[in-house]
Image (cartoon, rainbow, N blue to C red):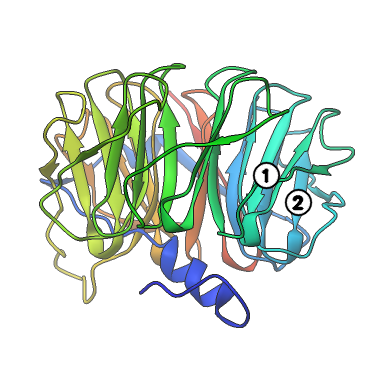
Amino acid sequence: MLVPLHGVFIRSRIISLLLVVLGFPQLATSSESTLSITTQASTTKSTLLSVQFPTPQQGWAVGSGGTILKTVDGGKKWKRVASGTTALLTSVFFTDSSNGWVTGAGGWLSRTMNGGESWSPQSLATQQPLYAVSFPSPSIGWVVGGGGTIFHTTDGGQHWNEQVSGTMAALYAVQFLDEQKGTIVGALGTILSTSDGGVTWTAQGTQSAVTLFDVSFTDASTGWAVGNAGALFQTTDGGAKWVDQTLPCGITCTKLTDLLKVRFTSRREGWIVGERGTLYRTTDAGLTWSEGKSIAPASLFGLSFPDVAQGWASGENGTIVHLQLSH
């Protein structure tokens, strides 16, 4: 259930908000034996809503209480970086090792140009919570948030202009394959697409009012969106049609798992994390998915893969988990 991001509701909302339930066409036994899972010491109990690894060595995690964490050794050691705020931070995105962006509650947007040594707040004409940031190139970027908010920059973030979304729904995730083609997902089954760099945004239909928390396209045609109560949708035609691929609850399931993040590292290999530390994996382009297993005693909100062999997930109570594939 969604509640405004302010006051005492901040934590409960994001936890509701970023929990994604997982469901798929078929459950299968994936090659889990090749996957090693290691919990890393984050030195914080903050809820970490987003994690990003631009490279296998350099990584970032952000979350509640203005928390920003940095690692330069693949997560063996994490150190806290001064963020300049106590706001709830919701997403982090680096375009390279030096230039990065963080979004948060109350219209918070900050950037670094020196690898996170210092962060500078950016002024946006909104008090809406901002949930996601994406830069397909160093100069072109988007920020999305509550109340259908979309901001766009064409000069590396020096100036931001608001774009017309055509909705008042909260927008939780944005992905651009290039500077022109992008997709945004959010509450009430909202899926917006653009093929002209956001000059126009077109609503796409899922035939469902489910809240969608994340989206991941593997190419211009094939994409996945995940949401609450196990929601999983797939498109194979660039988003013109979204097919419900939600999986059944399963033998041991008593409640459908909320799903938070979906990432594909190739056309065939995909991952989803969500509520109660649940992880799902596909190795056949989503035809089948491994039965969800809990890899942490906390809900997982963030997921990042710098390459096909390894990734990181982040979540409640400062949880950071390293996923390593061996062949």
Rendered residue at 21%/71% (across/down): 253
- Residue reaching furthest bottom? 8
- In the picture, the quarter occupied by the N terminus is bottom left
Pick whichever, 191 or 285, lies toward us: 191
- In this image, 246 relative to 154: left or right? left
Coordinates of residue 77 in the picture (x, y in percent): 80, 45
Q: Are marks 2 and 1 in contact (CB under 8 Å)?
A: yes
In terms of image quadrants, where is residue 166? top left
Q: Amino acid at mark 2?
A: Ile
Q: Secondary structure at mark 1?
A: strand
Label annotation for residue 102 = 1
Alpha-carbon span between mark 2 and mark 1: 9 Å
Depth check: give the residue in front, 74 or 94: 94
Q: Position of residue 154 (x, y in %)?
A: 60, 21
Q: Nearer the viewer, residue 136 or 44?
A: 136
Residue 49 in the image: x percent, y percent?
A: 57, 56
Task: Find numbered disc 2 in the image and state the secondary structure of the residue it sits on.
Answer: strand
Q: Quadrant of the C terminus?
A: top left
Mark 2 closeness class: few <14, some 14–19, many ≥20 residues within 10 Å: many
In-image side of 135 versus 187 (left or right)? right
Residue position for label 2: 68
- Identify the residue shown where x is 66% and y is 46%: 124
Q: Is residue 16 shown above or below 20?
A: below
Which label lies toward us, 2 or 1?
1
Q: Is residue 319 visible?
A: no
At label 1, the amino acid type is: Val
Residue 209 in picture, x, y percent from top left: 19, 60
